[in-house]
Image (cartoon, rainbow, N blue to C red):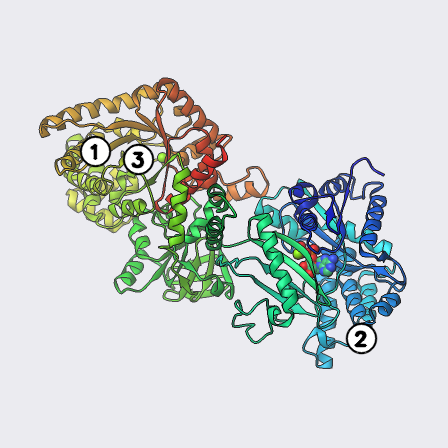
Amino acid sequence: MSEKKYVYTFGGKTAEGKADMKNLLGGKGANLAEMCLLGLPVPAGLTITTECCTDYYANNCKLPTGLMDEVWAGISVVEKNMGLKYDDPENCLLLSCRSGARSSMPGMMDTVLNIGLSSKTLPGLIKKSNNERFVYDSYRRLIMMYADVVMEKAEGREPAEGVGIRKLLDEKLDNYKKEKGYKSDTDLTTNDLKYLSDEFKKEIKKQIGQEFPDDAKKQLEGGIMAVFKSWNGKKAISYRRIEGIPDEWGTAVNVQAMVFGNMGDSSATGVAFTRNPANGANEFYGEWLVNAQGEDVVAGIRTPSPLNNDTKNEQNKHLVSMEDSLPATYKELCEIRDILEKAYRDMLDIEFTIQDKKLYMLQCRVGKRTGAAALQIAMDMLKEGLISEKEAILRINPSQLEELLFPILDSKDEAKQTVIAKGLPAGPGGAVGVIALSCEEAMRLSKEKIVSILVREETNPEDVEGMRAAAGILTARGGMTSHAALVARGWGKCCIVGCEAIHINMDKKTINIAGKEYKEGDVLSLNGTKGFVYAGKVKMIDATENPVLKGFMEIVEKYRTMGVRTNADTPKDAQNAINFGAEGIGLFRIEHMFYGENSEAPLAVLRKMILAADTAERKKYLNELHPYIKQAVKGTMKVMDGKPVTFRLIDPPLHEFVPQTEKGQKELAAELKISFEEIKRRIDALHEVNPMMGLRGVRLGVVYPEISETQFDALFEATLELKKEGCNPILEIMVPLTISVTELKHQKEIADRVQAEVEKRNGMKLEYLYGTMIEIPRATIVAKQIAEVADFFSFGTNDLTQMTFGFSRDDVNVIISEYKDKKIIPADPFQTLDTVGVGGLVGVGINFGRETKPDLKVGVCGEHGGDPASVEFFYTVGMTYVSCSPFRVPIARLAAAQAAIKYEK
Ligand code: ADP
Ligand code: MG
Ligand code: MG
């Protein structure tokens, strides 16, 4: 025997494993052992460890020497337990061979049932069971599963045109049933099943060129190997990619005594959830099938019956429930449900089989659930005393909260539709509306109260009004931090970007998806949480104003220590954020007043200022701009009364605001009383090859100090006016894109001068915090000096990621997806903070800053402020607060509370 222990047995009321041994035994194996320890009826069996799987692969796909000896020794324990003997002509034990990784990978790996049936054991089992039909039903199932899993998939056979052996055998079965006029598998007679078994074997020989093994020992060994092999099956590999499960984990193999749900009308098989997985209701929810085995329930060959009468639905209301049909067994199952929930203190998903009225448990695991169900179950279990407040908080995945905050597509209706295109899930929730191919069209429709989906190649700041008017946004290009995505998330608007399957034809006013044409005015439905596009109308449901959510968030607040602010630039968004629990604004972008609603007037002045001939002219237009800025600042500060508001000086390159069309440029020329050629010349002069690294941020204020001066003046005036009105404005000013303390001092001198003037003008003193964004790697390194002048830091992690990686966030989509596929980077760094690199710089910046000012306030205002994993990281580096879009505020609050609980010690 080998040195390592590879085999763990379970059965009776004992087991060598237990629930917390998932890493070694896989989820299924560990839970089977635990159910035995809980005294539940589980057919005896053994688990071959995940370690054995790893060794199997390390060993060139050979089972470790001595493994089979250990398995046979384990089988003899199982035999004693069951009073049966494997490969015995009179009293034979049959086995199932089941996969089971650490975390469940439903349907991704393979299982073989009824192993051990051969010409040697068939007659004895027929005699003993006195049920020939059952025996041949089991036999034909074994042949099909074995051919598929062991002889084809595990051998790496790639059948021509994707027609696998299972499909061929299934077709044979279907044709035969049709010929005979049978509706259901249960109509097949003993002779039919015998005949089919022979036919199956012939077909296998023909297709695969090998005999189905008539040797029980060989069958088991083949089964075990095939389960290990299925760890590297195509399906399993791609599932691991998506779910982020490491390849090294490996799967365990569970070899278990068979019990039979296909022995007749008092036998059955079923699956259930201990609570409703869709809405969390505390009701036993499941399905069962009489005279069936294994996957029949989920396979959809027959409509499964409801477990009980309370949970019947439209499809199954005419069928008899287990509650009515087998009341005693049902009662036993209900008791097991209670035992399991008490032991696991969570909602479970269970699989069971009834052999001649006797109940057996075959599987249990913590059940997957929707966000709504997760919330309901956590709050109920807290009330029932099953879990503590901290556990309730940790039970909800923060990103699941998102589902609860927006109107969404009705998942039931959605499941019936086909996805016509997929893109990046940029803005959450669902949207249903008619296609609008231009912003004008979206706005026109909105005036007529028609809901629209704005479909664009990509969006730019000029599109904001159209984006606002549409219910959902769909773009062919762009990444998760593209303009459309940022704007949409800020509003909590449903948005899908980078949907490359879409081809827009503006001449014909159509879009083409996979060869199908859709006209402007046709209806589309979007699932922005998943990135799925549907043709036609999918039902919507409203998910907000949920009292359970409110109760949950009250508990969350008890444990949260890190602050949560919002990124907002309008009174409406600010109010929204307050409703979601924001404690202030971490980022108010002054330039935002030049986009969207009511922006025409200030934008017109801004354009003139940008294209001014000289400083005097620029100052003239800046003076015209002043009241607009003051107005915008006041509006939002008033809503945020008593809460801090961080205003960022104008940041983007100015040419972004210049009209792009010839018509717009001509109009502007006329207003400025200059020629079209002259305006063209001035616009061209603003052109930069690399604007993201050009004249923007604090550089604008250094090159044109008057631009900063006007902003300071408007901010100070707005604050003092609010004070006079009896409000409590808390002003914070933030300088963007700083690289040195000298820049910051340069701007501070302007601010000090303006402050003195404004105070004098108003006869009032003013207080405010002067801080900076840290978003260029250099700034993190010189943070010690910067902190001499700055009262606070706010890390702009979007730009910091862009500058640290040298990835242009507007162009990098293609590269990032290639890099993710090739495992060069683990995730999109614009979505989830690169904790090692960018996060390392954040840590450096904080530490240096606090060397100068030990209680320096530090926050983060990039998109990462609303990403749960990033929020956890920010907690660990001592961030004072995170700031995110209004709709992500509850998510950040939950993530912050979870971090506080996790790192308590
Ligand atoms: P999956 O992980 O895909 O659910 P399982 O290993 O759970 O695969 O097997 C699928 C089904 O096969 C089970 O739900 C059960 O109905 C049936 N099955 C597995 N092992 C046994 C057994 N020992 N006796 C009876 N049925 C079994
Ligand atoms: Mg299962
Ligand atoms: Mg920035």
Amino acid type, label 2: Thr
* Callouts 3 and 2 close, C-beta under 8 Å: no
- Relative side of 801 to 118, left or right: left
- Relative side of 446 to 889, left or right: left
- Closer to the eye: label 3 or 2: 2
Disc 1 is placed on an element classified as helix
* Callouts 2 and 1 close, C-beta under 8 Å: no
Residue at 77 percent across and 77 percent down: it is: 189
Please provide percent x and percent y for residue 665: 24, 47
Between residue 578 and residue 699, name the one nearer to us.
578
Q: Quadrant of the N terminus?
A: top right
On residue 651, which mark appears? 3
On residue 711, which mark appears? 1
Disc 2 is placed on an element classified as helix
Label 3 to label 2, Cα distance in Å?
A: 79 Å
Amino acid type, label 3: Asp
- Closer to the eye: label 2 or 1: 2
Q: Which residue is mark 2?
A: 190
Label 2 to label 1, Cα distance in Å?
A: 88 Å
Label 3 to label 1, Cα distance in Å?
A: 12 Å
Amino acid type, label 1: Gln
Residue at 67 percent across and 40 percent down: it is: 248
Ligand 3 shows up in the quarter that is top left
Please provide percent x and percent y for residue 557: 38, 41
